[in-house]
Image: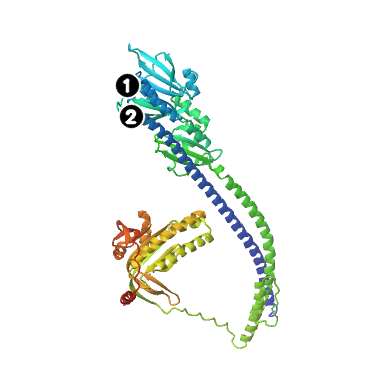
Amino acid sequence: MVDTAPGARQGKARDGWNSSLRSLFSLVMVAMLIVVSATLVGLDYHRSRNAAIADAEANMRGFMNRLVDRLGVLSGDTSALVNLVSSVANSFLVPPPERMNDKVAVLREGITRSPHIDGVYVGYPNGAFFQVVDLKQVAWRMALDAPRGAAIAVRSMERDSNGKPLQRVLFVDKDGTQFSERRLPPSSFDPRTRPWYRAAVNGKAAVSTGPYESATTETLGMTISQAHRGNPQIVIGADVVLDTITDFLARERLTAGSVSFILDAVGRPIIHSDRVMMRRIMAAKDKDAPIVQADSEPLIQSIRQHPPAPDKADFVQVGDRTYLVMVTPLESALLLSGNRAVVAAPLDELMADANKTLVQGLAISGAVVALAVLASLVLAHLITKGLNQLTASANRLQDLDFTTPIDVSSHVSEISTLGGAMNRARDAIFTFALYVPKELVRKGIESGHFSGRSAWRQEVTALFTDIYDFTTLSERHSPEEVVAMLSEYFDIFSETVGEHDGTIIQFLGDSVFAMWNAPAPDDKHAENACRCALAVQQRLSIFNEAQRKKGLPEFRTRFGIHTGTAVVGNVGAKERLQYTAMGDTVNVASRLEGMNKNYGTMIMASGAVVAHTGGTIHFRPLGTAQAKGRASALEIYEVLGAEPKEPEALDDGPKTHDNLSAGSESRE
């Protein structure tokens, strides 16, 4: 039993271990491949999704900017014409038929230069009315039965010499020559009752009314009107055709299912990119009914109930469909001012390419995993075969069986090397077992080369930096890309700090801790620290320009600078030392760097730094602030620039002597 029991025990252990290792190895290989593949596919999908959303948000913002620009052009041209008539044209201070030629000349010139203006008119406090209409609209030509060759129609409602109401239409050709006149029956139309007149009368600024559908041309339009400065009861108005806006909304679509519309102040749609929806809006408005029932347009109702933040893309759930929505207030243009423009795109349509990429990635990953299963089984067999032999040999060594040589053949070089090492261990154990029947003595740990722990008090200037939003940048790029960018970034600091007589004490992740006046003395340590920060900032602008050209993120760096006394020297454990500085000065510099984000600054310095620079650095005072963890308040300043540096003297012997003496005294 003594001879067979170890072998039986070893066989059981070997059989169970071999089976577990093979299964575990295959399982781990497959699991790792699945996890890696799923992670890569997920990251790729997440990246594609974020890119699609970012592109959609950029396109939405561009769409909004173009819409605002169009409204600005329409508002500017029309307001300029109305303002010109109300400010300069004194011929409109008298009602028609007086100074008719002057009135026609002014309005004809304005309407010819602005093709989006449908007509310009003037309302008088006595009920008189004067209008110039562009006959490019077929509806106007038919309504007025314009003769051939007429380019402009002039309508006037006045009173004849007997005081009776009179309405007539004059037709003017493209050269401004009147060649036809027609009398019309008196009309009950009174400009004083119209919204455009009531909104502007006795006012000083131009106002807009509408939108509305023109009764004559059936086009969507708005009116800009303004009281005449010579007589505020005389109102000049101009009809603006909004067809270009509705065409723009219908044409500029992110996807096939995207929509855009304009909501009024209470959230009702007044302009819509969908032609059918636009007709429903105008039909309901004509009937003085609610413009759109809530249940007929769920998207509009969802936005009204949960309005997204202005000018930021947000997700809105409508039934089982999600929309990416951006809402922009229209404030810069007179037309539609106070309303909100909305653009919405279905998320599933925006994600079509990303979903296609996901399916392709899953298919490829499945094929890779299937091949990996077969490869892992073969590799596991090769590895476990040699390990089985090594396990048997180890069990024999455990039983002090030195008679059987260890002969392991494997295609895996590490296993073959391990077999040779075990043979040498077998011989060594056999040899040492003759003298010392104990485990081998451990190898001693070699000591470090530092001279020992020592530190002293020293006045220094400390500089801390940090990259704004570095965590987000790290999430959006691979570790290799981040390391490559940081390496180039740290090169800038290393070179610039050295050029300004400073020392980089430590790189802390994406942060830099630099120090002046230690270990080398520097009587301009505060000035040099500020100049270094400004120089780094300038070089980073070139670095960031290159980053933008490569499509990589910019590094926005904040700096904190403080001058004071710190404990400087070699600190740490016996086995590990580090040259550094410790104390309140270092902590304050770190706090100042973080306080930049509260003041919108990039380089912040303390009052102690200002006191040591002697007017060579330009600062902007920011007042006093309380640094976290510090009882007393600090005077803080923003570093703006520096005076040109004076050339150093050729003979700097005495200066060096003074610096060395000062350094020695501070140590003592």
- Observer-nearest residue: 388 or 90? 90
521 on left or right of 26: left
SS under mark 2: loop
Residue 480 x, y percent position in the rendering = 54, 61
The reply to whether residue 367 is visible in this rendering is yes
Residue 110 x, y percent position in the rendering = 41, 28
**Crowding near pointer 1: few (<14 within 10 Å), some, many (20+)?**
some
Q: Amino acid at mark 1?
A: Val
Which image quadrant for residue 538? bottom left
Question: Going from the N terminus, do you reach mark 2 or mark 1 first?
Answer: 2
Vertical side of 120 occupied by 378: above or below: below
The reply to whether residue 586 is visible in this rendering is no
SS under mark 1: loop
- Observer-nearest residue: 369 or 658? 658
Residue tagged 1: 94
**Cα–Cα gap, marks 2 and 1:** 14 Å
**Crowding near pointer 2: few (<14 within 10 Å), some, many (20+)?**
few
* Labelled disc at residue 187: none
Q: Residue furthest top?
A: 162
Vertical side of 269 occupied by 18: above or below: below
Contact? badges 2 and 1 (CB < 8 Å): no
Residue 83 x, y percent position in the rendering = 35, 31
- Observer-nearest residue: 168 or 601? 168
Q: Amino acid at mark 2?
A: Val
363 on left or right of 140: right
Residue 395 x, y percent position in the rendering = 65, 77
* Labelled disc at residue 88: 2
Which image quadrant for residue 178? top left
Vertical side of 78 occupied by 631: above or below: below
